[in-house]
Image: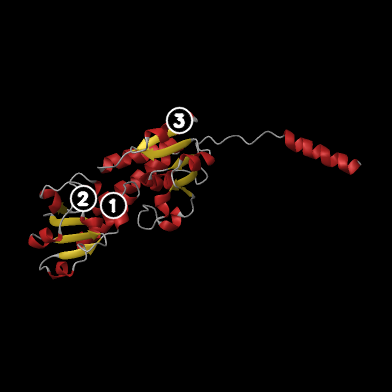
Amino acid sequence: MIRAAAVLALAIAGCAQPAPAPSEHPTIVSLNPCADAILAEVADRAQLLALSHYSHDPRATSLPLAEAKRFRITGGTVEEVLALSPDVVVGDSFMAPATRAAFERLDVRVETVGIDLAVADSEAQVRRLAKLAGHPERGEALVGRIEAALAETQRTGPPVSAILWQQGGIVAGGNALAANLMVHTGFTSQSAARGLRQGAYLPLERVLADPPRLILSAGDGREQHHPALRKLKGVTYAEVAPNLLYCGGPTIPRLARRLAAVRDSL
């Protein structure tokens, strides 16, 4: 009886202990594949409850796949997200109004981030998400790495004419982040000079009729790998991983270094 009373007293004392203090930093679910890569660097792992499902797709992730696999994902449904009880949901500007309203009605804060068109836009987005996560210093550290990579990869001299040919035969517009990095690393976009905008389709025949000095292939379509391209005189053919083109943030140093390496090989 004495032993039982002691056990009961300990149990009561344990129940009387104060609950752990809530974290000072918000918990986050990301539905935005570009925010995924940034948040994985600037948020604590325990804060980031889930990434978008794109980050577990080798063809779409802007994170190293092994790193992305450390986090759970959701399909983006309201039910899946609410089951995780996040403080904040990070989406994109295309989030359905009904979805946003459902989150806000249940007191879940919603933040949206857009598409980066310039390095400065991407750096502002890094700072914003780092501040949201409660770790602004990590955002500054990531911006510092981006700036260091840009300083390392800037190339001067006469620009080399190039086409960045993406999945489905489309090209990057002149204002796209990838096109801006091409200029930074010593290229000029022939497709932009032709007036082709972001996502415009570029037929193989036009490339063969008026080829650039460099073809950067970022897709596996028939156009990008046609044998006729390899027979063009004075034209260099190089490949770029497609997932380097989807987002900014930590992807910028990787794309800039890839482009600079190609430029140095010419």
Which circle's residue, 3 or 2, is located before the other in the chain?
3
Which circle's residue, 3 or 1, is located before the other in the chain?
3
Query: Mark 3 is on which residue type?
Result: Glu
- Closer to the camera: disc 3 or disc 1? 3
Picture quadrant of residue 226: bottom left
The answer to whether 129 is drawn above or below residue 172 in the figure is: above
- Specify the quadrant that holds the N terminus: top right
Real-space CA distance between mark 2 and mark 1, rounded to the nearest whole angstrom:
9 Å
Picture quadrant of residue 209: bottom left
Query: Mark 1 is on which residue type?
Result: Leu
Q: Residues within 10 Å of mark 3 (few under 14, many from 20)?
A: some
Give x and y (percent) for residue 221: 24, 62
Residue visible at 53% across and 41% down in the picture? 83
Q: How crowded is mark 2: few (under 14 residues within 10 Å), some or many (20 or more)?
A: many
Give x and y (percent) for residue 161: 12, 56
Judging by the rendered image, the residue that carries numbered circle 2 is 172
Residue 65: tell me if it is visible: yes
Q: In this view, does 14 lie to the left or right of 240?
A: right
Which circle's residue, 2 or 1, is located before the other in the chain?
2
Q: Which mark is residue 104?
A: 3
Picture quadrant of residue 237: bottom left
Real-space CA distance between mark 3 and mark 2, rounded to the nearest whole angstrom:
36 Å
Query: Mark 2 is on which residue type?
Result: Ala
Q: In this view, does 114 lie to the left or right of 57?
A: left
Give x and y (percent) for residue 175: 20, 44
Q: Residue 245 carries which label?
A: 1
Determine the residue located farthest toward the front in the rendered image.
98
Residue visible at 39% across and 53% down in the picture? 63
Determine the residue located farthest toward the left in the rendered image.
209
Q: Do the residues labelled 2 and 1 touch (CB within 8 Å)?
A: yes
